[in-house]
Amino acid sequence: MSLVTVFRAFNPIEAQLVRSRLDAAGIPVSVAHETATLTTEGYSGTTGGVLVQVPEESVADARALIESAAGESA
């Protein structure tokens, strides 16, 4: 199963909020680089942030959910 990054955050809390929304919608999701970000200062910025990833077949649904959530907060 190939994972695709659908969201990047430079704050692990923001990544976990997105992960939680996707998980609640039944979309399989994982978060990468979170622990390193918490333990190594500046790591998040140099590696592209905390990555929220989903399987390829869930990318469209995940991006639609993320975009709708962003529209609600605007």
Image (tube, helix red, strand yellow):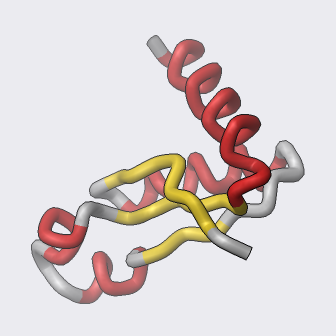
Q: Quadrant of residue 35?
A: bottom left
Judged left or right of residue 41, residue 18 is right
User: Is the residue 70 above or below the residue 35 in the image?
Assistant: above
Q: How many numbered discs sit on the rendered protein?
A: 0
Identify which residue is drawn at 44% across, 63% down: 51
The quadrant of the picture occupied by the C terminus is: top left
Q: Residue at x 58, y 15 (%)?
A: 72
Q: Is residue 73 left or right of residue 69?
A: left
Left or right: where 20 falls relative to 43: right
Q: Position of residue 39 (x, y in %)?
A: 26, 88
Residue 29 versus residue 55: which sits nearer the camera?
Answer: 55
Quadrant (top left/top right/bottom left/bottom right) for the N terminus? bottom right
Residue 61 appears in which quarter of the rendering? Answer: top right
Q: Nearer the viewer, residue 36 or 7?
A: 7
Residue drawn at 52 percent across, 23 percent down: 70
Q: In the rendering, at what x and y percent does residue 58 appear?
A: 76, 49
Q: Residue visible at 62% across and 35% down?
A: 63
